[in-house]
Image: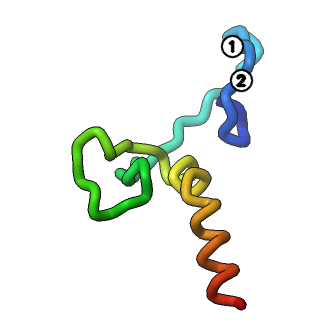
Amino acid sequence: MGGDGEILPVQPAAEDLGTIAATRVALATMHRDRDTRSNADANFIALCQRCHMRHDRPEHRRRRWRTLF
C-alpha cells in the first residue's frame, strides 16, 4: 500500500524502500451492509480504521446533510 492507503500497482524493489517504519494498525469490525440488525457471520468484515471510515463515508455524508438541513 502506498502512503495514502492505496494499493500500489507494482511492488517496489527492496532497495527502493529505504527505512521501513513499523506501524500499529487497529482493526475495526463492521457490518458490510451497514445494517446493525443483520448479525450473520458473512455480514461482518474487519478493516483498518481508515478503510472503515472510507467504507462508511457515503452514510456519514448523508447523515451530516440531514442534520444540517
Q: Amino acid at mark 2?
A: Leu
Give the position of the N terminus as an image quadrant.
Answer: top right
Q: Splitting the image into 4 quarters, where does residue 9 fall?
A: top right
54 vs 6: above or below: below
User: In this view of the protein, which residue sits in the foreground, 60 or 46?
Assistant: 60
Left or right of 39? Residue 68 is: right
User: In this view of the protein, which residue sits in the foreground, 33 or 57?
Assistant: 33
Mark 2, residues whose alpha carbon is within 10 Å: few (<14), some, or many (≥20)? few
Left or right of 22? Residue 12 is: right
Which x, y percent locates residue 58?
A: 63, 61
User: Which residue is rendered at x = 52% and y = 42% of the image?
Assistant: 23
Left or right of 43? Residue 10 is: right
Which x, y percent locates residue 26?
A: 42, 50
Q: What whole-number distance in Å separates the C-alpha atoms at marks 2 and 1?
A: 6 Å
Query: Circle 1 sits on which residue?
Result: 11
User: Which residue is rendered at x = 43% and y = 58% of the image?
Assistant: 34
Q: Amino acid at mark 1?
A: Gln
User: In this view of the protein, which residue sits in the foreground, 27 or 68?
Assistant: 68
Label 1 near label 2: C-beta < 8 Å? yes
